[in-house]
Image (cartoon, grey):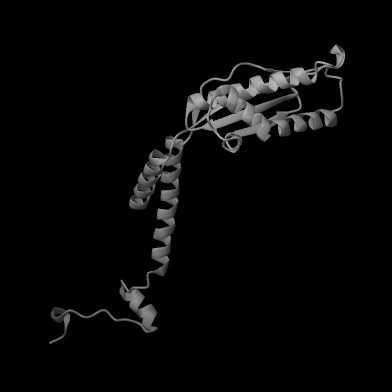
Amino acid sequence: IALVALSATGCSFLFSKLQPPVYRSSVLLINTARLDWGTTMSVQIHLRQQEEQLKTVGLASKVNQRMRLDLPPDAILEKIKTKPYTDSISIRMDVEDFDPERARKIALGYGQVFEEEKAAEYSLVTPENRIRVTMLEEPRPGTLVRPNTKLNTAGGAILGLLLGLVLVLALEYLDDTLKTPEDVARYLAMPTKPRTPISARPI
């Protein structure tokens, strides 16, 4: 059990160390509007539309040009994940990249470009019906999200202990060797009689 647990722990640690680090930077895009401008369903539809707009190739190209990332739009789109929040009428965007500073630039570029595009889109709408999209705050440099060496190592140790225990139980179950006279008697289906020492035999 100890050998399997140590092996699994070591493998988990080495696997984590060999993985390239991934950093995440986030930006929160808030819709400033009247809370009575529509029903919950309308808010969900509105946020879903904005979420789809964030995932377009055109917007990714504008972010690439502004931040001078020198990346194809498809590569940028692979790095972003979005999640809408109907209670606060906002969308959270997470950007994951191998470079923490580039992750921040992509998140910042999306926040700036999307904010400007929505301002132009709603500029002709009356002020009472106007929706303004703003960044809550500028994104920070990415923080490490993968690999989690401590968590992976601990998980490997627990898994190793379980595998070691299962292996020991399986070997014990499959072991059919005869170790005691009782085992021999059970196997041959006949009783065994202990051998009488020579010194105890009658003359």
Tell me if 182 is positioned left or right of 118 in this view. Answer: left
Q: Which residue of the protein is positioned furthest toward the top in this rendering?
A: 127
Residue drawn at 37 percent across, 84 percent down = 190
Q: Is residue 124 above or below residue 103?
A: above
Q: Is residue 183 above or below residue 89?
A: below
Q: Which residue of the protein is positioned furthest toward the bottom in this rendering?
A: 203
Looking at the figure, which quarter contains the C terminus?
Answer: bottom left
Q: Is residue 119 above or below residue 199?
A: above
Q: How many marks?
A: 0
Tell me if 128 is positioned left or right of 52 in this view. Answer: right
Tell me if 138 is positioned left or right of 192 in this view. Answer: right
| Residue 180 percent coordinates (x, y) | 31, 72
| Residue 90 percent coordinates (x, y) | 72, 24
Q: Is residue 55 visible?
A: no
Q: Nearer the viewer, residue 89 or 52?
A: 52
Q: Name which quarter of the figure residue 112 lies in.
A: top right
Residue drawn at 76 percent across, 18 percent down = 120
Tell me if 202 is positioned left or right of 189 in this view. Answer: left
Q: Nearer the viewer, residue 149 or 58?
A: 58
Q: Is residue 176 visible?
A: yes
Q: Name which quarter of the figure residue 44 lies in.
A: top right
| Residue 76 percent coordinates (x, y) | 58, 34
| Residue 131 percent coordinates (x, y) | 79, 18
Residue drawn at 76 percent across, 25 percent down = 87
